[in-house]
Amino acid sequence: MAPISCKVLTTCIANILSAGLGAVSFHTSTLLDPAHYSSGDIIVRDVAVIGGGSSGTYGTIKLKDLGKSVILVEKEARLGGHVNTYFDPGSGTPIDYGVQAFWNLTVALDYFARFDIPLVDYSFAESETEYADFRTGHFLPNFTYSFDLSKYAEQLHRFPKLDYSWNISYPVPEELLMSFGDLITTYGLEDEVWGMHTILDGVANPADILDSVTLNIFKWLDNGYIAGAEGADRTTQKPEHYNAELYEKALAELQTNSSVLLNSTVAAADRQCTYGGQGICVAVRTSDGYKLILAKKLLISIPPVPWNMQPFGLDSNEQVLFDKWNYSGYYTGLLANSGLDPNVTYYNTGANTSYNLPVLPGAYFFQPTNVEGVIMYWYAGPDLLSQEQVEADVLDQLRRITSQTQTPDFLAFGDHSPFKLVVSADDIANGFYRDLMALQGKNNTWYTGAAFATHNSVELWNYTSSLMPDILESLGPSARVAT
């Protein structure tokens, strides 16, 4: 299913604004004019943060701790983004079915400690494993693979700056621009491909990861994930704690001084706003009507795809860059009454594909959780799909590998799309990431999130933290101190 076009979204937004504002015109100039708002609907802050996922929540808390006034805008009814936790109704036991673990770095330890959440060593699920082609239901009883990624790591370590940024040299090294498949054959990584694949969940555009640009793989399967595979990750202790607890506690703190708007989306923005001496005006549609945010700076953490960025009045340079993205559809879920052996993890394994890689779209695995009978799956493909489409395909795959016609109970669903934003080798060679990083601070706007760093919570926190000195300097000495 193709994403909704910007033209369609623009029309929808205009219709929504017209209906929501009633007698007030839905023109951008009206939405951004304080004269059309009561004083109680105008929010004045140092920084407005858009997106309450991993990066946005961390950035909001960090700015608050630095004494700045902040408002966080999140479209969902919760914070946490790709962190998904389900509570078993019978036992109350939490099941994390999104983000599983966190790299054992100081920034992570400090963040969890700030909210009094203890961490323990992360261990992979203890279960037997079976390998099956989910397209046909055919099992591969003799399949084995190596989890030794040392040859891959040797190539990755040639580019240490990629651990922290998209800081690449120009001209771009040939190895970074070649396809992942060519990297494998050039450096003899064939025995490591399936082991690498188990960490590349969600990288699904192009659907065959062998066609991916090597730089895009390096920025996913980086030293953080290799360290995690070697046992360097931490997680929350179940059942007393769970991964979403971090965001629940952050939310509770932000709500105490009205520093968060949930169920809210940006309707329009002016990033060269002059009202009240601020640089940013943001009209936000909330469940209680429209609010106007007046801020000095903007920190955007949502995926910078065209339909997300349309309300921000992009300049031509921003529009050109954001139009180049490709992305994957990525979904997580839980189900019960699956017909699967509750003590077995089933991996999607191509019976007749290169390196036995699974064919996408499809589920990567069906895995037992910490609640007996509840199964977790992760699913990806090159297109954005609805929950109904994903669950219908998951059902078909289940019936193939179980040879049964049962209908499972779908308990929970997480949509992590658009996931893993990437551009082509030509765009990389022509300076895409140099130009992308040059956006920082322009138009009173700063960016964080996976498109500017990587899909690793702890690395995102490090990256967001690295922006703080420049954001603080841009605020100047007169920035408001939070109370």
Image: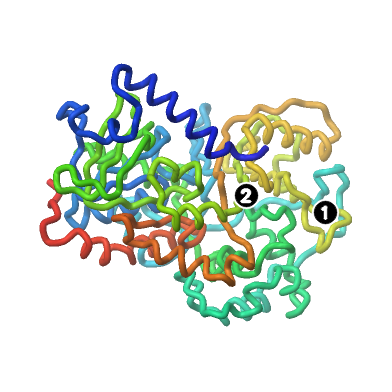
Q: Closest to the observer: 38 or 202?
A: 38
Q: Closest to the observer: 391 or 291?
A: 291
| Residue 129: % across, % down | 75, 52
Residue depicted at x 64% and y 67%: 425
- The quarter holding residue 404 reads top right
Q: Which residue is mark 2?
A: 328
Callout 2 amino acid: Ser
Residue depicted at x 33% and y 60%: 442
Callout 1 amino acid: Gly
Q: Classify residue 360 as left or right of residue 86.
A: right
Q: Classify residue 233 as left or right of residue 189.
A: left
Q: Classify residue 184 as left or right of residue 214.
A: right
Q: Which residue is mark 1?
A: 350
| Residue 85: % across, % down | 49, 40
| Residue 278: % across, % down | 19, 48
> What whole-number distance in Å separates the C-alpha atoms at marks 1 and 2?
20 Å
